[in-house]
Amino acid sequence: MCGEEPQDKEKIMDETTRRTFVKSGIIGGASSSVTDLAKSWRTYWPEMIPLPHPSPRNNIGLRRNPWLEAELLPSLRKHASEVIAR
């Protein structure tokens, strides 16, 4: 980890924390997948928004779960705009 920028360390910590929460059952349940958690996003809204990792490798998952772009992302965009406007 030598030579990493502080923001890189923050990204690593965020990802590690998210995975820890999912795996330990703090979010969802011990057997919940990230997809299952994202499907139940309304349960956690707006305090927490479980999302799949934004990776080009997730394009297959996005195609298999069109509800993510049709339902969750528009709500997230609207909420983010409202928060920013405050």
Image: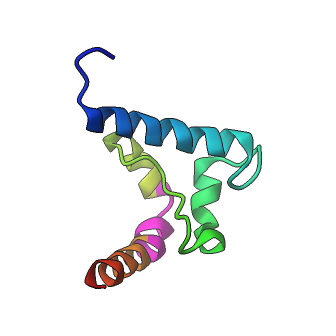
Quarter of the rendering containing residue 39: bottom right
Question: Which residue occupies 76% across, 51% down?
Answer: 29
Whether residue 8 appears in magenta in the rendering, the answer is no
> Residue 2 lies in what quarter of the image?
top left
Q: Residue furthest top?
A: 2
Q: How many marks?
A: 0
* Left or right of 4 on screen, residue 12: right
Q: Against 8, is 70 above or below?
A: below
Q: Nearer the viewer, residue 68 or 66?
A: 68
Return the residue nearer the eye: 30 or 69. 30
Residue 13: give x, y in percent of width and height.
45, 36
Q: Horizontal and vertical percent for residue 17? A: 54, 41
User: Would you place residue 82 above or below residue 52 in this image?
Assistant: below
Residue closest to the far right: 30
The residue shown at (57%, 74%) is: 45
Return the x and y of residue 23 as percentages of the image width and height.
68, 39
Q: Residue at x 43, y 46 (%)?
A: 53
Structure colour scheme: rainbow
Front one among 48 and 33: 48
Main SS category, magenta section? helix
Residue 24 in picture, x, y percent from top left: 72, 40
The residue that appears at 65% across and 45% down in the rendered structure is 22
Relative to 72, is 23 above or below?
above
The residue segment tinted magenta is 64-72
Q: Quadrant of the C terminus?
A: bottom left
- Image quarter of the N terminus: top left
Establish if 6 lies above or below 21. above
Q: Is residue 4 left or right of residue 17?
A: left
